[in-house]
Image: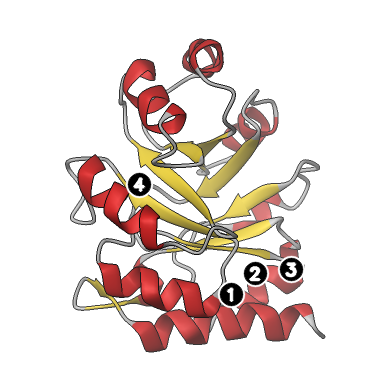
Amino acid sequence: MTRIKLCGLSRLCDIETANKLKPDYIGFVFAPQSRRYITPEQAVAMKRLLDPGICAVGVFTDETPEGAAELLNRGVIDMAQLHGSEDEAYIRKLRKLTDRPMIRAFQIKNGKDAAEAEQSQADYILLDSGAGTGTAFNWDLIKNIKRSYFLAGGLDAENVPYGIKALRPFAVDVSSGIETDGKKDCGKMAAFVAAVRKEDQR
């Protein structure tokens, strides 16, 4: 079964919808430059309401290892997603500070990017077109990747079945594809989850 991550949740009503839909992961964005940014205090309040069966992922862009580890070790989030210029040295340092799992995001523009992603020491890799661009990349570039990955970048309820059928990713990650006017849309969230589960049953 393809795992589902609904990223960039920022309101209590987003959590209520997630609890009904039961995705495997939800994402809180801690990158201040993002329009989906939330504070750690907001994340605490939302995590308190989140179904305990759903994994909360904290999305960071060039946060210090100490800052990310603090939120992980306090249980504000369950996993870290590294979406900036963090490298393998950063991952090694973060591992000394926490035993929580981490995802490293890669922008896939060519075959070299795909090869680098496959060698990452992170627990999981996420393959994307860019940091929140909301556009898809050339999926042919990752057809030969052997390790499990999160597929991201421009996914929505319409195209996610094609991505699953073509690539069989470990998980699919969506943010802008479940929004209307920059806010999460409960109808689009439900449609995305339904599309993934329908394709898995084929």
Q: Which residue is mark 4?
A: 131
Measure the C-alpha gap from mark 1 to mark 4.
19 Å
Badge 4: how crowded within 10 Å, few (<14), some, or many (20+)? some
Q: Which residue is mark 3?
A: 166
Q: Which mark is residue 160?
A: 1
Measure the C-alpha gap from mark 3 to mark 1.
10 Å
Measure the C-alpha gap from mark 2 to mark 1.
5 Å
Whether residues under marks 2 and 1 lie with C-beta atoms below 8 angstroms apart, the answer is: yes
The residue sitting at 81% across, 42% down in the picture is: 146
Check disc 4 and give the amino acid type.
Ala
Measure the C-alpha gap from mark 2 to mark 3.
5 Å
Residue 90 at x, y = what percent?
47, 15
- Foreground residue, 114 or 170? 170
Left or right of 105 in this view: 111: right
In which quadrant will I find the C terminus? bottom right
Q: Which residue is mark 2?
A: 163
Is the residue 41 above or below the residue 88 in the image? below
Q: Is residue 156 visible?
A: no
Colour mapping used in the image: secondary structure
The residue sitting at 61% across, 84% down in the picture is: 195
